[in-house]
């Protein structure tokens, strides 16, 4: 077993708005070295770092739009979001909850701040991740997993270092509740200042760490501050993080699907022809119907 070293510590890019409800820093795929091919199966990661929304009678967010060929995963750290899609999936997620929507052959959905939360406003912090699907699963039926914070299993670390919340994959024998189409590890590592956590993933799995709270040192060498992303190299299996402040770290590692990627807007397919077909199907109303 070899040490997995740090390839890059990426600072957050200038934020932009998605609709009027999500103020995000894009880490994947724009710029750096983290394009879709390098990060496969993680094809997009938008991070809404802590941002205070003023009270609004009309909930802010993103209106009806399509997705096809992948999954959208939203992790709520602060604030509340309501989601509805044309396959009948939907619900509200709050602090610690996760919605995992499989768009597969195509859905329409909308994402808004939850109405009551919107009226009060407050601090908002979320991650939206797109997970690619293998070509056969891009043709599958849409699916929706609502993962409540209380259903997420955690592993307590030795020496009161903190704990690892296992969302997907497995940590020290504890399995995550999320079902995935390809092997993926997704953890929230919640470490107390000075606490250490060790991880082991296959070398070829693409791996990133996002600093939601606090700061860490990776392998005793590289510092990663709040709101930064650490890209791990594909040169080994093992690495260790140590919190230099109370920290929350989103840990993602996934097996590359290694299929061609043809992406445009809300569609991620394997070929240009499939993309064209996706736009045609969408324009012909084949993604179903959803009220604004
Ligand atoms: Mn969406």
Image: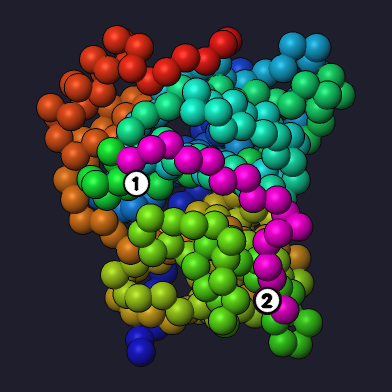
Task: Identify the residue under disc 2.
Answer: 155
Q: Which residues, given as a range, are shown in magenta?
A: 140-156
Residue at horizontal 27%, vertical 50%?
134
Quick check: 265 left or right of 96?
left
Residue at horizontal 75%, vertical 46%?
95
Looking at the rendered structure, the secondary structure element under dot 1 is strand
Q: Is mark 1 within 8 Å of ligand 1?
A: no
Q: Which quadrant holds the N terminus? A: bottom left
User: Residue 127 occupies which quadrant of the picture?
Assistant: top right
What x and y, as percent, mark residue 132? 34, 46
Category of crowding for the residue at label 2, using alpha-carbon neighbours closer than 10 angstroms: few (below 14), some (14–19), many (at least 20): some
Task: Identify the residue under disc 1.
Answer: 132
Up-down: is 133 above or below 201? above
Q: Nearer the viewer, residue 129 or 193?
A: 129
Looking at the rendered structure, the secondary structure element under dot 2 is strand
* Spatial CA span between label 1 and label 2: 28 Å
Residue at horizontal 33%, vertical 41%?
140
Residue 141 part of the magenta-drawn span: yes
Residue 80 part of the magenta-drawn span: no
């Amino acid at each position: 077993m070899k040490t997995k070293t740090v390839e890059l510590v990426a600072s957050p890019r200038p934020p932009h708005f998605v609709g009027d409800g999500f103020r995000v820093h894009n880490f994947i795929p724009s710029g750096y070295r983290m394009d879709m091919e390098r990060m496969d199966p993680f094809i997009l990661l938008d991070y809404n770092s802590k941002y205070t929304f003023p009270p609004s009678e009309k909930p802010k967010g993103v209106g009806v739009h399509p997705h096809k060929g992948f999954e959208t995963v939203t992790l709520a750290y602060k604030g509340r979001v309501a989601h509805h899609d044309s396959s009948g999936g939907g619900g509200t997620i709050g602090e610690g909850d996760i919605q995992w929507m499989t768009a597969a052959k195509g859905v329409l959905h909308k994402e808004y701040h939850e109405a009551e939360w919107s009226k009060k406003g407050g601090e908002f912090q979320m991650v939206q991740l797109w997970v690619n699907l293998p070509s056969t699963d891009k043709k599958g039926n849409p699916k929706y997993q609502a993962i409540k914070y209380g259903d997420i299993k955690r592993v307590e670390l030795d020496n009161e270092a903190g704990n690892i919340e296992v969302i997907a994959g497995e940590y020290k024998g504890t399995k995550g509740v999320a079902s995935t189409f390809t092997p993926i590890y997704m953890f929230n590592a919640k470490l107390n200042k000075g606490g250490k956590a060790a991880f082991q993933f296959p070398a070829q799995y693409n791996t990133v760490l996002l600093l939601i709270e606090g700061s860490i040192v990776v392998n005793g060498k590289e510092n990663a501050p709040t709101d930064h992303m650490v890209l791990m190299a594909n040169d080994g299996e093992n690495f260790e993080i140590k919190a230099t402040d109370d920290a929350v770290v989103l840990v993602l590692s996934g097996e590359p699907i290694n299929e061609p990627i043809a992406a445009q807007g809300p569609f991620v397919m394997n070929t240009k022809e499939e993309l064209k077909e996706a736009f045609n199907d969408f324009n012909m109303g084949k993604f179903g119907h959803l009220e604004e």
